Amino acid sequence: MPTGANKNQLRFLMLCIIWGSTWIGTKAGIQAVPPLLFAGTRFIAAGVLLLLYGWANGNISGLKLRDGIRFTAVSMLMITLCYGPLFWGMQFINSGTAAVLEMSLTPIALLVFALLLSEETLDGRRIFAIALGVSGLFLFWPESPQEASPSPDIFPGASLWGGLAVASAAFTYGYGSVLARPLLRTYPALFVAGVTTLVGGIALFAAALAFEAGAVSALSGDWGIVAWLSWFFLVIFGSLIGYTTFMRLLRDIGASRAGSYAFVSPVIAIALGAAVFAEQITVMDVIGIIVMLRGAYLAMSGAPAAGHAARLN
């Protein structure tokens, strides 16, 4: 049986693999379905399934009224204000640029908000690990687009605004992650994941119906097999497994360590690209992989074991 530390390392590796592959599913889905509707329906489905599973296994807690505001804030930040701009912005920049942009900022945002909200203390080793990982990520920055932009600039500055929207997702997710940690000391991770995905998904769905062109007509479900397969992949792996795993890591090892998945996920994405699409791996890619993996190793080494957490489910 794995120890607490080994359990967290296994969770971390699983999260890296899952979230390294979700960019492909997201790109395929938003090409056929309005992005806010695609994201909203995904998270509503995931939230309902998580809460049903938790109820069946006795991992559902009564929500205390005093925690309602924090739950709402976490739902809006980690789901609505993260994935709404992220999916919308990916229409106007290629997926490689979006992945590097969001992943390079996520560990920084997580550490900054953890320090500001006194959830973590400043640690030179951790700062160095994040700096190392981010520098490795930037080695992947595309010098020229290797794929066509998902959509031409349908309005002036569309690619710029798309990039800013993707970048903003890292900071809303980071802030929400740090705000969620106190909830994870009181409630099971499964319950926190279920409530936040459901509430955040409902807000995305409402925004899609109110403001997104084509959202109402897309409710017919005529998305095509590729979009539906992408949707199911994101619900099951990206949300049910990935998001819950991140919540457990967030509870056990803190925001900045948990966020170092962003240094490993691009390696997974590159390996998948080489295996599935025969994409070439350059010398610079190899250097970046080595640097990022070293940053992730430094960030995860010395992480606290899972056993000290108050609630393990």
Image (cartoon, rainbow, N blue to C red):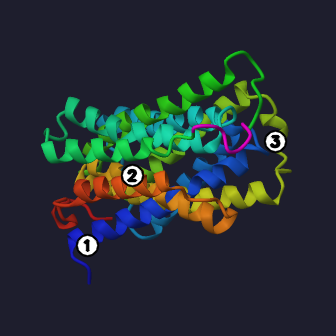
Q: Name the disc covering residue 6, or none.
A: 1
What is the spatial separation of the Cα atoms under label 3 and label 1, in whole angstroms?
44 Å
Q: In this image, 78 relative to 21: left or right?
A: left
Pick the front one: 85 or 201 = 85
Residue at x-position 21% and y-position 69%? 5
The amino acid on which the numbered mark 1 sits, given as a three-letter code, is Asn
Q: Give the extent of the magenta segment.
A: 143-149
* Secondary structure of residue under mark 3: helix
Q: Earlier in the sequence, mark 3 or mark 2?
A: 3
Query: For residue 145: magenta?
Result: yes
Pick the front one: 64 or 195 = 195
Q: Name the disc covering residue 237, or none.
A: none
* Secondary structure of residue under mark 2: helix
Q: In this image, 222 relative to 182: left or right?
A: right
What x and y, as percent, mark residue 70?
A: 34, 35
What x and y, as percent, mark residue 165?
A: 55, 28
**Taken as a whole, is the magenta stretch helix, strand or loop?**
loop
What x and y, as percent, mark residue 140?
A: 49, 46
In this figure, which residue is indicated by the disc labeled 2? 263
Give the label, 1 or 2, closer to the camera.
2
The amino acid on which the numbered mark 3 sits, given as a three-letter code, is Ala
